[in-house]
Amino acid sequence: MNHKARRPTLQDVADKVGASKMTVSRYLREPQQVAEATAKKIAVAMEELGYIHNRVPDMLANAKSRAIGVLLPSMSNQVFSSVVRGIESVSGPAGLHALYGHYGYSMEREEQQIAQLLSFNVDGLILSETQHTDRTLRMLETAAIPVMEVMELPEHPVDLAVGLNHTAAAKEIVGLMIARGRKRIAYLAARLDHRTRQREAGYLAAVTEAGLIPVLIHTDQPSSFTLGGQLLRNALQAAPGLDGVFCTNDDIAAGALLACQAMGLSVPAQISVAGFNALDIGHALAPQLASVITPREAIGRVAAERLIGRMEGKVYPDRVLDMSYEIFLGQSL
């Protein structure tokens, strides 16, 4: 295979069909305006040549696409639906169109999605991750557009970042469990992404400073209520005398709390349960789930505001903005 083969152009398609470049261009914009027989020939030629259409051709050098790219780890994750609400509360009124993609917590998939978004000549990017491949970083440097990383506080942001301190939040809520007399606390961790590891660091800091023995229950499976119940059962087997579980998120925590109740374990009398993100499910449970309130919608709103500011040439000396979190005590501690 010739890896240096020239990328087929619009003129190549026109030459193969025996039509003008203008006709091919018209087909790409409005295929119904081209004679059916010619349209079929163009479609076949494009497939045979491997032609890839540039979705924003011939943009003026000083023009803006009025679009931003937003990458999310999951389209179904309730945590990021709040972030999206915040983004769109700003982007819509500003006349910006948001192009969304998801990367399934994979840096390689993120790299592919960023390349695709950049092909649309977006004016800026909002990324839900702070860990990137080398190629991603090179692409972002070459693109030279504003980039906003959200949900974390990277030491070396690509451009700007807005998020919260997951380690400090985890340490604080686990510290509250310890202050209430818990001596054997497990950390239930799913997916094992970067934020899960940060929360683990906070858990470890709290238990080791208190002289307690860490109990880590890990899985790389995606979070679910069912998985939370399974991890709770694994923790009870691994740590006799378990009297508390801190969970990487509320899906896991809710599943753990329900599993405790199904097994006849009183929450919080016999075992306390805490989660992260303070989702609505936690408020619907009895007892209500203790959790960390993360300002996700506010993060999305501030991220969009600052991204637009950067697109307009504003400079932000505080490149990384720390948004405050709160602890919802609930009744499960």
Image: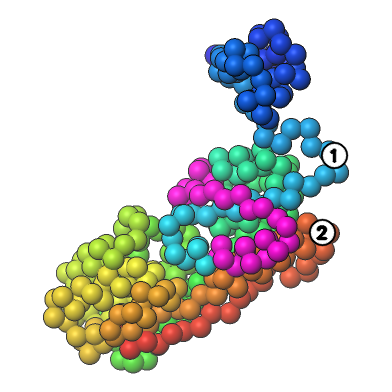
Question: Quick one: label 2 or label 1, which is nearer the N terminus?
Answer: 1
Residue 197 visible within the image: no
Q: Residue at x 85, y 39 (%)?
A: 61
What residue would you read off at disc 1?
A: 61
- The x and y percentages for residue 159 are 71, 58
Q: Residue at x 71, y 42 (%)?
A: 121
Assess disc 2: are there few (<14), some (14-19) or many (≥20) residues with their C-alpha within 10 Å of its C-alpha: few
Where does the magenta region start and end? 83-111
Q: Is residue 310 above or below residue 47?
A: below
Q: Is residue 287 left or right of residue 277?
A: left
Q: Amino acid at mark 2?
A: Glu
Q: Residue at x 32, y 55 (%)?
A: 221
Element on which disc 1 rests: loop
Q: Is residue 111 above or below residue 23?
A: below
- The x and y percentages for residue 151 are 56, 66
Element on which disc 2 rests: loop
Q: Is residue 69 above or below residue 36?
A: below
